[in-house]
Image (cartoon, grey):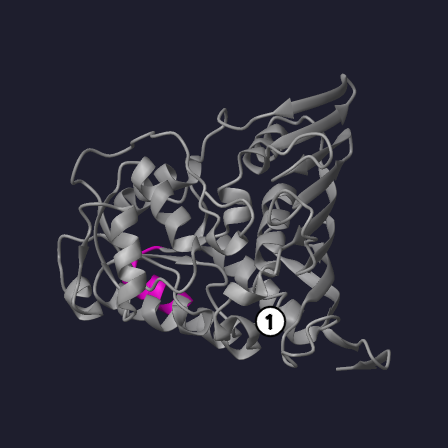
Amino acid sequence: MNKQDGMNYAPVGKVDKVVGEGEFRFAAIGLDHGHIYGMCNGLIEAGAELVTVYDPDHEKVRNFCEKYPGVTASISEAEILEDPSISLIASANIPVYRHELGLRVLDHGKHYFTDKPAFTKKEQIELARRKVKETGLKWGIYYGERLHVESAIFAGQLIDQGAIGRVIQVIGTGPHRANIESRPDWFFDPEAYGGILCDIGSHQIEQFLHYSGAKDAKVLHSKVANYNHKQFPAFEDYGDATLVADNGATFYFRVDWFTPDGLGTWGDGRALILGTEGYIEVRKYIDIARSNTGDHLYLVNKDGEKHFEVSGQVGFPFFGQFILDCLNQTEHAMTQEHAFKAAELCIEAQEQAIIIEAATSSLNR
């Protein structure tokens, strides 16, 4: 696992199988983003069997098959979609095409598990909602900065236990290292990735809905900028937004591509969660100048101040729950509407954003 490169950050957890051998077979289609490795790791650890892969880039397929020995390379997407033994397709293709693949997957009677952002336009979400209703199949979204981070999962468990009372405000930060030289061309095109608030902002909005227990929220204010990557004029290297939830909880988040070279990981992602009876701070990937390990959580409430290091202790329950949801038509891992609502709100934040023109300090819609 490369802690320096967020695009290829693929957590590995404990094996905790919820199904028997061959009971839940899946395939990968679309290897444009390295998150596909984390997605596959989580499903395999939960007992799913990865059987085949397709991508038009043969080099990507070769590397994937080296990582997962025994996986075969399919000659086409259709070969996989038409295989009745495969229950689910996992994908991390270019974001603008993710909804199109999802529609094809569900039309072939398979569940879909896609990287975030799952959509770049609201119309795509409506098509997905209709297809899910029509087929009864799952359209899972990999919000990895909560689902694949043990300290973030532990924060949710503490909240459910009432450790800080009712959540009334959340602050989220999602800085990333740009690694410009290793990025593909589509990374710099907002039409391809949806814009910074749609893309990495999706992690932030999903965790806010989860921690606050909200079903919906309103975007009050958002803004984006390209401060330091003028060689890519359409690129956005900074974004932030403020939201208020339907239950009164409020949220501010910031995302950016300004992780300095001296940091020991690809981004110092954090969440600060305020409740009526205490607060939690999650330091997901590093505890700067103290520990280069991740999964640190700080809790302050009526019982005092506590520091937890939970790496290797909490696990990643989403993946097993998601497999069982697919098999049993339940919604224990994440409700379908929660997954879609987080995607919808990040697109709203993107579409409403004020564009900061750094050179002139002018504000334009």
Residue at (53%, 52%) from the top-left corner?
A: 5
Residue at (73%, 34%) from the top-left corner?
A: 289
Q: Residue furthest top?
A: 303
Q: Read off the magenta span.
A: 129-138
- Give the amino acid at mark 1: Gly
Quadrant for the N terminus in the image: top left
Q: Secondary structure at mark 1?
A: loop
Residue 322 in sight from this viewpoint = no
Quadrant for the C terminus in the image: bottom right
Front residue of 47/33: it is: 33
Residue at (63%, 78%) from the top-left corner?
A: 232
Badge 1 local density, few (<14 within 10 Å), some, or many (20+)? many
Magenta highlight on residue 184: no
Front residue of 161/22: it is: 22
User: Quadrant of residue 278 in the image?
Assistant: top right
Q: Is residue 92 left or right of residue 306?
A: left
> For mark 1, what is the residue?
195
User: Quadrant of residue 159 in the image?
Assistant: top right
Residue 47 in sight from this viewpoint = yes
Q: Is residue 84 left or right of residue 285?
A: left
Could you say where residue 292 lies in the image, as x and y percent from the top left?
Answer: 63, 34
Could you say where residue 189 lies in the image, as x and y percent from the top left?
Answer: 55, 77
Could you say where residue 323 lies in the image, as x and y percent from the top left?
Answer: 31, 43
Front residue of 229/343: it is: 229
Q: Main secondary structure of the magenta part?
A: helix
Q: Is residue 99 left or right of residue 251?
A: left
- Looking at the image, residue 228 lies above or below residue 110: below
